Amino acid sequence: MMERLDRRIFGAIEFVDALSDAPLRAPLHIDAPGLRLLPNRRGLYVIHAVDGEDDYSRAFDDPPATPPRRDFRLTIHDPQQRYLSQTLTLALPRLLPQPGVPLDDADNAQRPLRVLLYPSAAQPLRAAWAVLRLAVQLPGGVGLANVVIEAQPRLAGQPLRHALTDAHGEALLVIPGVPAILPDAGGPAGLSREFRLGLQLLLDPAVVVRSDAAAVPVPDLRAVLARREAGVPALRVISPADPLLSAGSSRRHVETVSWP
């Protein structure tokens, strides 16, 4: 005889490859104090339990009042080290949509929370991709970890991309889907193999440290972007000159900055 056990879940998280926008199926290590997460067959990490909320998750006929929202901090690591570690702050319980009330996907209890994971230097690369290995360093050569990079290819139809510098101050920027030959009014025969990549470096003192620091914090990219959007004065934005890239090639660029 099988026993049926009903529980109210608190939501789910879908981890996505930032290069391909495809859901990740390989197992991840998630440190989530106060939460119990289990992967399902679709690769979603389902939040089955929250400390102190067992009555709320089990009662259906006469459920208790919805508990007050609390923030939980998750740290995500890839055991194969193909993706950079990062943190995530998750407010629970998530919210149910109400008619006429806008609700961000990050708070919508009826949708999985999509979290992009960014490639490390160990990520396998395809031969046709345009690749930039960017080092952000201080005068003297010491790297800066946890610099958030916004990259906008100067090509129609290419989206804005993000990357992070690792503990050595290096970031991997990959632009897939670029044709080998591009129109260029100023080039020979009106064609070119190269395109420019617009860059902005976001240096947030909450997470940016020298690569020779005793400890390098695991960054929360969403929080950095939110602080940038809010205009936090301490967050510096640096706009380097646009480097040139081309499909099927890998180039290296060193950007020297002053910090703090």
Image: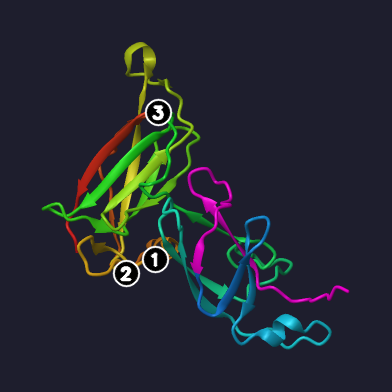
Residue 259, placed above or below residue 1: above
For label 2, the crowd category at 10 Å Cα-Cα, with few meaning under 14, some 14 to 19 and many 20 or more, is some
Q: In whole angstroms, how far apart are the C-alphas of marks 3 and 2?
A: 35 Å
For label 3, the crowd category at 10 Å Cα-Cα, with few meaning under 14, some 14 to 19 and many 20 or more, is many
Q: Is residue 13 left or right of residue 80?
A: right
Instruction: Tell me the quarter of the picture where residue 254 sits.
Output: top left
Residues 78 and 166: in front is: 78
> Which residue is under mark 3?
247
Residue 62 at x, y percent in the picture: 81, 87
Residue 54, placed above or below residue 104: below
The tally of labels here is 3
Q: Are marks 1 and 2 in contact (CB under 8 Å)?
A: yes
> Which residue is under mark 2?
206
Q: Residue 162: which numbered mark, if any?
A: none
The residue at the point 67 percent across, 55 percent down is 42
Q: In whole angstroms, how far apart are the C-alphas of marks 1 and 2?
A: 10 Å
The residue at the point 52 percent across, 43 percent down is 20
> Which residue is under mark 1?
227
Label 3 residue SS: loop
Instruction: Tell me the quarter of the picture where residue 233 sits.
Output: bottom left
Residues 189 and 22: in front is: 22
Residue 4 forms part of the magenta stretch? yes
Residue 250 at x, y percent in the picture: 33, 33
Q: Earlier in the sequence, mark 1 or mark 2?
A: 2
Label 2 residue SS: loop
Residue 136 forms part of the magenta stretch? no
Label 1 residue SS: helix
Q: Earlier in the sequence, mark 3 or mark 1?
A: 1
* Residue sitting farthest toward the front: 1
The type of residue carrying mark 2 is Ala
Residue 258 at x, y percent in the picture: 17, 57
Q: Which residues are magenta?
A: 1-30
